[in-house]
Structure formats: C-alpha cells, structure tokens
Amino acid sequence: MSRAALVVALAAGAGACAAEARPALAGEARAPGQVPAQAPLTLTRALELARQRAPALVAARAQVRSAEAGAAEQRAAYLPSVAAIVSVTGSSVRDTEPAPPPIGRFTSVDHSASGSGTASLRWTVYDFGRTGSAVDAASAGATAASARAAAADLDVAAAAASAFVTLHHRQRLRDVAEAIVAQRERLAVIAKGLVKAALQPPLEELRAASRAEAARVLLAGAETDLEDARAALASLLALDAAAPLAVAAPRLPQIDPAPVPTRAALVASDPAIAARSAEELPSVAAARADHDARLAAARAAAARYRPALALSIDASYALARHADFDVSLDTRQATGTLAVSVPILDLSIAPGVARARADAEAARAVADQARRDAVTEASRAALAVRTTGAAVEHARRAAEVAATVLEVVQARYVRGLSSPLELIDAESADADARVAAVKAELARDLAIVRAYAATGRKLVEINS
C-alpha cells in the first residue's frame, strides 16, 4: 500500500472512530449483547414499588392508626361507662342435729338457688378541662402522625427517584466509557499503522496503547459505580440486588425557563415561591401538631389543680328460692352518688406542670427549626434547579465543540498536519466533555427531584 493510500485509509478510520462515539453521548446506544431481556423499569413503576414496600411507610401508617385509636380512647372519657355483673348460685345442705329421745337426732335437707344482677354507671360530669385537654393532645398527636406519614411518603419517593435517576445516568456514563475505550482502541490501531508507515515514531504506538488502557480503567470504574447504583435502587424497591435491573430514561417535569412558565416550574425554580410552599410541608405540619399536643398536655397537667364532678349510679336485684318453703325472696337496691373531688395536697402536680410546659417550649423550638430548615432547603433546591439547568446547556455545547475539534484534529493527525500532543489534548477534552455532559444532566435531574421533595409536590412523569 502506498503512503497516500495508507493516509486515506487511516483518515477514514479516524472518521468512523469519531462517528461511533456520538450516540454514547446521548445515552441512546448500547453495546451488542447488553440489551436487557426484560422491559426496562420506569420511574413511575419504581415509585409505586417504593411506596408499596418501604418499611418506613408501613410503620408510619401503623402509627397513624395507633394515634387515631388513642384519640378515640381519650374522647370516650366524655361518655359514661356502664358495667354489669350477673351471678347465679345454687346450694344443697344436709344438716344433722341431736334431738331428745326417743328421736335421738334430727336431719334436715335444704335446697336453695339464688341469682343476682348488678349494674353501675360512672360519669365524670365536669373536670374543668382535664378531659378536654387530653382529647386535644391526642387529636393533635393523630394529626402529627398523619403528617409524618405524608412526610415519610415524600422521603421514600425522593429516595427512590434519586436512586432511579442516578442508576439511569450511571448507565449512560458506562456507555460513554465504552465509547471512549472503542475510540482509543481504534486510535491505537491508527497509531500502529502510522508507525509502520514511518509517519510517526514508535513512541506513538506505546502512547496510544497506554491511553487505551487508561480508558479501560475508566470503564471499570464506571461499571463499579453502575453496580453500586443498581444495588442501591434494588434495596429501596425490595428487589433482588443480584438480578439484572435496567431502567428507562426518566421523563422528569421540564423546569427550563419558558415564556409562560407552569406552576410546577415556578415552584421548583423560584426560591421565593418554593420557600412559601415549604411552609406547608408535612414535616412542618407534623412539628406544629406536636407543639399543639404538648400545649394541650400542659393544660391537662395544670387542670389537675381543679376539682372534678363525678356521678355514679349503682343498681342491683337479687332473687333467692328455698325448696323446702317453696317461696322466692327478691331484693332490689339503687344508689346514686354525686361527688366532688378537690386536690388539697398533691406534690406531683407542680413538677408535672413544669415538665409539660418545658416540653411545650421545646416542641415550639423544634417546630420553628423545622420551618426554617424546610424554607432553606426549598430555596436552595430551587436555586440548584436554575444553576444545574444552565450548566447542562453549557456542558452540551462544550461536548459538541469538543467532538468537532477531535474530528478535525484526527483527520489532520493522520495526514501529519497535527502533532500527537494536539491529538491527545483533543481526545482528552472530548472524553472529559462527554463525561461532564452526562454528570451535568445527572446533577440537574437530582436537583429537580430535590426541588419537588423540598416543596412537597408529587413527582409525576410527563407524557412522552
């Protein structure tokens, strides 16, 4: 082969090398033999599985039921309690007693049966807020439990969505690493041909082989990160971590600026609107409900200083029958009591009130801190959406420019018009730009998930 023909062949190979690397940047191509047999998991399905199988949600829902039952138990104190006892007794007595002669002894047998029924009614007519405060505390506790369950749902969804997005983009990073390996292997072949044609020194073949090995190290790291992300998502969804798990591209809501931005875009990208939305988060509502419960408990503790008015009514009926006399005897009785109890000396009341008030003060501080944290997180998440969105655009442009530069430098290199250092620089810039573009999209998608979780909005995939 003539030198001119070799240059043409190497130039064609360099062009094919640059063209092959482009689909990997978009994450749309997979290496042969790596297409999963099963349908890829979608983000919507992943969120459903996470909500169905998360132990934290199961526990939170059980706590809601427990709190609601506790509130119902406290409300029952408003109503009277009624108790009834029914008893039946039977006896047979044979008695022998001495008697004067000629009788000697006297024997008697007595068979009897009796039954009785007792009913009692207890009702606290008025206790000056003790029961009402306990009911308020229990109701606030049930509200807090419901809010915590909603917060747990948000946390589970955010964790699953973040893990899903991470896995998807690590698949793309693995694909980019595979494309870089293929590109550098082809460049090693080109360098070998140039060295054989005496167009480049032998050092260039070693340098190209070394860079191919470095690309394989990058691919191994990408494979490790991919397996780690796959195991993390499988754990959240209660799937087999050792089984293959492929995910489809998530169709996240678009937050990019538009002439007429949607409400979701404003909430997720405007710090002021996001901060206002964060004040209504379930976690903030739960902290406020906890504060209300502590205040009610403090009022209930202080109410122990006050008297209580209680009504009790007892009624009973008893029936007895003796077989020997063939007669039945009954007894009826009813008693009503209205009692007022006043605490005169109870040294446990004052410490109990002090403890309850201190708990209420601590709960108020916790609620304030929860609101501040929520507002701060929402504002930061909205800012992250803006900045990462801008970074994605810059990263994409940088990748496009780096690809164009590499294609030109490769063509010039095989013709001897560019130095090896120019090729190495262009090749490194192209690889770094492609990796940076995928990482920028990962950061943007994670920021969107974070913004939706920070503002309490449900993350729903858009229609394709």
Image (cartoon, rainbow, N blue to C red):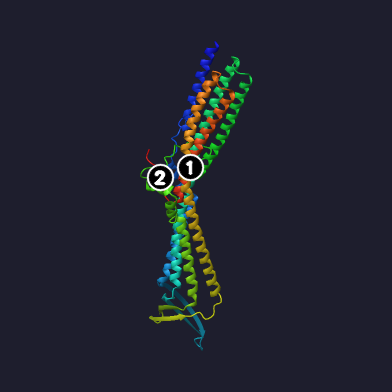
- Which quadrant of the structure image shows residue 136? bottom left
Disc 2 or 1, which lies upstream in sequence?
Answer: 1
Residue 322: % across, % down: 41, 80
Q: Which mark is residue 252?
A: none
Q: Residues within 10 Å of mark 2 (few under 14, many from 20)?
A: few
Foreground residue, 389 or 438?
389
Q: Secondary structure at mark 1?
A: helix
Seen in the picture, residue 333 relative to 391 is either above or below; the reply is below
Residue 164 visible in the shown view: no
Seen in the picture, residue 353 relative to 101 is either above or below; the reply is above
Circle 2: residue type:
Val
Residue farthest along the front direction in this orientation: 417
Seen in the picture, residue 242 relative to 328 is either above or below; the reply is above
Foreground residue, 117 or 176?
176
Circle 1: residue type:
Thr
Image quadrant for the C terminus? Answer: top left
> Comparing marks 2 and 1, which lies closer to the viewer?
1
Please give the name of the residue rendered at 45% of the width and 58% of the height, measured from the top-left corner.
285
Q: CA distance from mark 2 to mark 1?
A: 20 Å
Q: Which mark is residue 460?
A: 2
The residue singled out by tag 1 in the image is 388
